[in-house]
Image (cartoon, grey):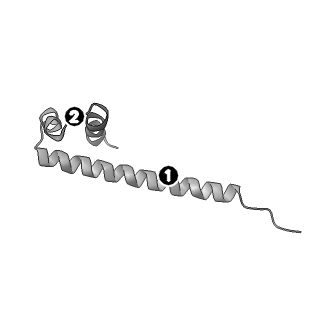
């Protein structure tokens, strides 16, 4: 994640700030904070999906049986 979304995620989920507190801290409107958090979560979901897909491909390759004689 870029710096701003990463900071918002950290402040919200690690430090427990509410959207209104985040808005004040980041000098943004509350609606902008909700949008920032939504987009950050979507980016994280996409990253997890890509990682799972990539790892699943590796495990399939690793568990493929050798050809029969």
* Extreme residue toward the top, this view: 15
Q: For mark 2, does the 10 Å Cα neighbourhood hold few (<14), some (14 to 19), or many (20 or more) residues?
A: some
Q: What is the quadrant of the C terminus in the image?
A: bottom right
Q: Is residue 38 left or right of residue 1?
A: left
On screen, residue 2 above or below 38 = above
Q: For mark 1, does the 10 Å Cα neighbourhood hold few (<14), some (14 to 19), or many (20 or more) residues?
A: few
Q: Is residue 65 left or right of residue 59?
A: right
Secondary element type, mark 1: helix
Q: What is the quadrant of the N terminus in the image?
A: top left
Mark nearer the viewer, 1 or 2: 2
Q: Is residue 25 left or right of residue 40?
A: left
Label ID, residue 64: none
Residue in the picture at 62% in, 55% down:
58
Q: Position of residue 13 (x, y in %)?
A: 30, 37
Q: Position of residue 18 (x, y in %)?
A: 19, 37
- Image quadrant of residue 33? top left
Label ID, residue 51: 1
- Image quadrant of residue 30? top left
Secondary element type, mark 2: loop
Residue in the picture at 64% in, 55% down:
59
Q: Position of residue 19 (x, y in %)?
A: 17, 41
On screen, residue 33 above or below 46 = above
Give the residue pinned by disc 2.
17
Nearer-N-terminus badge (1/2): 2
Residue in the picture at 27% in, 52% down:
39
Give yes or no for contact between labels 1 and 2 (Cβ–Cβ under 8 Å): no
Q: CA distance from mark 1 to mark 2?
A: 29 Å
On screen, residue 8 above or below 35 = above
């Amino acid at each position: 994640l870029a710096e701003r979304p990463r900071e918002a995620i950290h402040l919200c989920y690690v430090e427990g700030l509410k959207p209104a507190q985040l808005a004040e801290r980041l000098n943004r409107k509350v609606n902008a904070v909700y949008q920032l958090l939504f987009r950050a979560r979507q980016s994280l979901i996409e990253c997890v999906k890509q990682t799972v897909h990539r790892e699943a491909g590796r495990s399939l390759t690793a568990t493929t049986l050798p050809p029969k004689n």
